[in-house]
Image (cartoon, grey):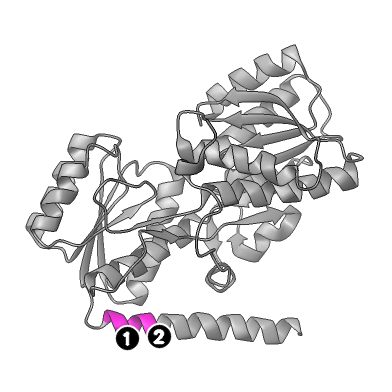
Amino acid sequence: MGKSILKLMVAGTALATIMAASAQAEDGPKTIGYVVNYATHEWYQNVIKGMQDRAEQLGMTLEVKDANLDVAKQVSAAEDFMSQGVDVLILTPVNEEGVVPLLRRAKAEGMPVVLEGNPVRGMTTMVAICDYDTGYHAGVEAGKYAKENFGGVAKVMNVGLPLLSATVLRSEGFMDGIRTQIADAELVHDLDGGGNPDRALEVSTAALAQNDDVNIIYGINDSSSLGGLQAWKAAGKSQDNLLVVGTGGEGLAFINAMENEPSYQIEAAMFPEKVGFTTIDAAVSVYNGDEVPEHIVSPTSPMIGEEWATYYQYDGDSRAIIWDAVNAIQPPDACMKTAADLKG
């Protein structure tokens, strides 16, 4: 099939989807309130951009309040939205247990609620990626890269975050994926990078001082992979025989790394804008009383080398998502593994 025909098909499918959702939204919600857990983070800024784009397409008003990692503030903001009479409430929970009473109250008052990112007891539905799958597919690509460039040797430093089940699933998925290509892939270092660049740099520096016999750095988010790479460079090591794999595609950092760091060749992209887009569609469905799954999966995809430019336009200062390309990615019907499947 020619590329021009494929592009027309993708564009046509995207237009048909928008038209169908627009028709559905005519009798749908008019106002949606979103209480984000941490609005200063690039990930959530791009989630909000995706929500705004979709709400604008559907002729809806989206209002956003920031909990700033304070569960009491989140509950108060949600209660304010309910008092204002928004049609649907969207929450990214600060604390899973802390919002259980809020969900109970919303249900009693007939307020539809959609969660983003994290499950909470008593929820109707949640929009989130499949974390294990995200790591797994990146691991498969890393294994292919290692077979082609490193003679089939894979020695991994995982800059992880064992505190959260989602990030543990990404790390497990990555190692399981790489072992589909290289059965004896070795996990040399399994680190707690805290999910932030300073901690990731600190623990990676200490690990490499102890044993620098690694050729793959995997990070459960972009801060983790970049912290690991910074430690590698600070040790004066060449990137010639190194592969760095990031996760998230949260903002501009991964694009700059893929453009400027020779080792940063794979990004497990999670498309925060698409998460926001899908969450608005979920809000319409819940408002209309449609049957929805407990977990609505938002798609992810490994980006290799310059493939990021298929999904984003970048002018050096900001990025813009290419909606037709991202909307064409089909999410799985169900995740390969969930938190319930974690190894003991």
The mark found on residue 23 in the picture is 1
Q: In this view, does 206 lie to the left or right of 35?
A: right
Residue 82 picture quarter: bottom left
Query: Contact (CB < 8 A) between labels 2 and 1?
Result: yes
Examine the residues drawn in magenta and state their main secondary structure. Answer: helix
Q: Residue furthest right?
A: 151
Residue 265 visible from this viewpoint: no
Q: Tell me which residue sits at (70%, 46%) in the image.
A: 177
Q: Tell me which residue sits at (53%, 47%) in the image.
A: 131
Q: Tell me which residue sits at (29%, 71%) in the image.
A: 284
* Closer-to-camera residue (226/173): 173
Which residue type carries mark 2?
Met
Q: Is residue 77 left or right of residue 154?
A: left
Task: Say few, some or many: other residues with alpha carbon within 10 Å of mark 2 (under 14 / 14 to 19 / 20 or more).
Answer: some
Q: Helix or strand or loop: what does disc 2 sit on?
A: helix
Asked if the stretch drawn in magenta spans residue 21, the answer is yes
Q: Name the residue under label 2.
A: 19
Q: Which residues are the magenta region?
A: 19-25
Give the distance between the C-alpha atoms of the residues marked 2 and 1, in whole angstroms. Answer: 6 Å
Coordinates of residue 243 in the picture (x, y in percent):
77, 39
